[in-house]
Image (cartoon, rainbow, N blue to C red):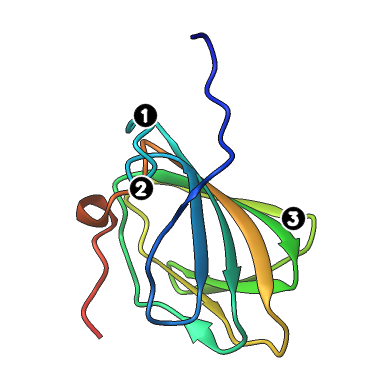
Amino acid sequence: MPYIKQDRPFVVPTTDGKLIEEHYGHASAHGGAFSVAHMVAPPGWSEPFQTPEFDEVTILVSGQKQVEVDGEMIILKAGETLLIQRGTRVRYSNPFEEPTEYWSLCVPAFSPDSVHREEI
């Protein structure tokens, strides 16, 4: 079949209140060339710094997302996109009062072994 229609994304289990729905990638069993995930991060959410082995494009749908990259603070707003290149030390968070909704595209696909999150 020359296409894959996704109507049941894999919901990644989390403990921090963040919704992660992987539509394509390792967890959804669609391969490792790339991954596409829909995410909703609650107010106050944050994760540790990471230095991934993949390029990551964030497409912000609503709210705001704070990105710390190489000592610079970037605020991403609805309708904006951001490319973080592989090998860059980055930290994502939502210190704002409203949830933030976004899509993430990773090339190659996201995997827990290739994200290299730092210990808190």
| Mark 3 Cα-neighbour bin, 10 Å: few <14, some 14–19, many ≥20 | some
Residue 106 relative to residue 120: left or right: right
Element type where label 1 sits in the image? loop
Q: Residue 97: give x, y in percent of width and height.
A: 71, 90
| Image position of 99 with respect to 79: above or below | below
- Taking the spot 24% from the left edge, 61% from the top edge, the residue there is 116
Disc 2 to disc 3: CB gap under 8 Å: no
| Mark 2 Cα-neighbour bin, 10 Å: few <14, some 14–19, many ≥20 | many
Mark 3 residue type:
Glu
Element type where label 3 sits in the image? loop
Q: Say whether disc 2 or disc 1 marks the residue closer to the N-terminus.
A: 1
Quadrant for residue 49, please give it. Answer: bottom left
- Taking the spot 57% from the left edge, 62% from the top edge, the residue there is 39
Residue on which disc 3 sits:
80
Which marked residue is nearer to the observer: mark 2 or mark 3? 2
Residue on which disc 2 sits:
110
- Taking the spot 58% from the left edge, 28% from the top edge, the residue there is 5
Mark 2 residue type:
Phe
Label for residue 33? 1
Disc 1 to disc 3: CB gap under 8 Å: no
